[in-house]
Image (cartoon, rainbow, N blue to C red):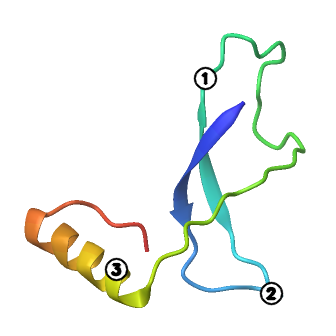
Amino acid sequence: MEATVDQVASESRDGKVRVELAVIPSPTLRVALRHGMPGTVEIEVERKLPSALVLRMAGQWVTGAKAIE
């Protein structure tokens, strides 16, 4: 099963950051997902130079695209 990061909290608590995921439906999933079910996720983090991040944010600001904060 796959998911994408939907929202990231702006501050951490006890060294952790809350992340909300949007699950991508899978035809092979045999169990109906319900709120509160336990699970484990592995999140792949993109590595970028600070200058690349600034340019990305500037591009989103110019085009009016929504940025994840």
Residue bearing mark 3 = 52
Query: Residue 30, located in which quarter of the rendered image?
Result: top right
Closer to the chain start, of discs 2 and 1, is: 2
* x, y percent for residue 6: 51, 53
Residue bearing mark 1 = 25
* x, y percent for residue 39: 87, 44
Q: Give the residue drawn at x 82%, y 44%.
A: 36
Label 3, label 2: how far apart the Cα atoms are: 26 Å
Q: Secondary structure at mark 1?
A: loop
Circle 1/circle 3 CB separation < 8 Å: no
Query: In which quadrant will I find the N terminus?
Result: top right
Label 2, label 1: how far apart the Cα atoms are: 31 Å
Q: Give the residue drawn at x 78%, y 19%.
A: 32
Q: Give the residue drawn at x 80%, y 50%.
A: 41
Closer-to-camera residue (53/38): 53
Crowdedness near tag 1: few (<14), some (14–19) or many (≥20) residues, C-alpha within 10 Å: few
Query: In which quadrant will I find the C terminus?
Result: bottom left
Question: Going by the image, does 62 lie left or right of 58?
Answer: left
Any mark on residue 15, and which? 2
